[in-house]
Image: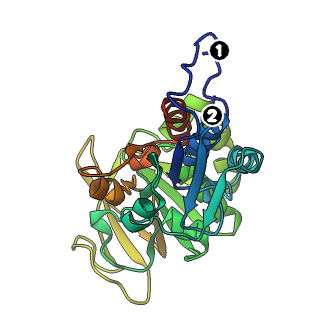
Amino acid sequence: CLVNPRAGREAVTLAPPRRRGRRVCVVGGGPGGLRAAVIAAGRGHRVTVVERGGRLGGQVLLASRLPGRGGLRAVVDDLAARLGGLGVEVLLGTVADTDLLRAAEPDAVVLATGARPVRPGWAGDDPRIVGVREVLSGAARPHGRVLVVDATGFHQAPSVAELLAARGADVTVISDAMIVGQDLGLTLDLERWNRRAADLGIRQDGDLVVTGFEPSGAPGGRGQTGNAGGLTVNVTHHPTGAVRHHTADWVVHTEPPRAEDALWSTLRADAPFELHRIGDCLAPRRAHAAILEGDRVGVLL
């Protein structure tokens, strides 16, 4: 269960804390960090959460803006609401670096610093090729003909395609997998997505690998920065090797992110405190993994 990772494990007895009242610093206020803070504080530790942003919730706050994903907010809102009753100190707008952590003299530090977006190698630096986070944050507002590239197989590409189609864009989604959003079948969302996509006029195509782009014109060149006009995105149908070309005004990619683990790399060699990392900071995955690991480390402290 995303909300309660102990569902189905009720018979497992939790070990008591090694020592109550330990000073614990959790870096990152996303779902994993919040779960770690709630569990650790509930087991008698003195916990501080350090979040560089102005709000708790991490990337769930952005994901909850997508069509049909608003329920995600409840996950982090519930955890955030529990912090006050447990006496957890929350530092918003604060960057946790080695100096801050060493000065705090904690007994343990939990790094839940998440992941950072990755721009695919084929994308060059054209400003009309953007990531999902840029769309959701409002930094980019794709319109006209939009090509969405699904490289994750989950909610990201289908949901942003719905969002843009509802705004009036002419949307096509392609994937290097056999179908768009292939992992939606795991959550029984695939059939509903296909119905909504059909209603919105979203086109879908699978087995296509993006190899580059160029300003609209003669296709076949390497990716480069375009000026006015559209983009020609070159793709290969990998089962047959056939080369195709998609013309679009904007491209939205959903490339898997990269672990934000610089602080871990700095501290791991000689940290004067117990050090853990969880969630995307360990390996980018989905919210369930972050919450489960936050729960486990909260029990281990």
Q: SS class of the residue under badge 2?
A: loop
Amino acid at dot 2: Leu
**Above or below, comparing residue 172 to residue 68 in the picture:** below
Q: Nearer the viewer, residue 191 or 91?
A: 91
Q: How far from the left and from the top, in percent, is residue 246? A: 40, 65
**Above or below, comparing residue 231 to residue 38 in the picture:** below
Q: How is the image coloured?
A: rainbow
Few, some or many residues within 10 Å of mark 2 (<14, 14–19, 20+): some
Report the residue at 30% width, 74% height from top: 124
Q: SS class of the residue under badge 1?
A: loop
Q: In the image as oriented, which residue stretches furthest toward the bottom?
A: 228
Report the residue at 44% width, 85% height from top: 229
Mark with earlier residue (1, 2)? 2
Q: How many marks?
A: 2
Amino acid at dot 1: Glu
- Judging by the rendered image, the residue that carries numbered circle 1 is 10
Query: Could you give the CA–CA distance between mark 1 and mark 2, rounded to whole angstroms?
Result: 15 Å
- Judging by the rendered image, the residue that carries numbered circle 2 is 2
Report the residue at 39% width, 76% height from top: 231
Q: Nearer the viewer, residue 292 or 234?
A: 292
Q: How far from the left and from the top, in percent, is residue 139? A: 56, 77
Q: How far from the left and from the top, in percent, is residue 103? A: 44, 64
Q: Nearer the viewer, mark 1 or mark 2?
A: 1
Q: Which mark is residue 30?
A: none
Few, some or many residues within 10 Å of mark 1 (<14, 14–19, 20+): few
**Above or below, comparing residue 73 to residue 50 in the picture:** above
Q: Is residue 262 left or right of residue 83?
A: left
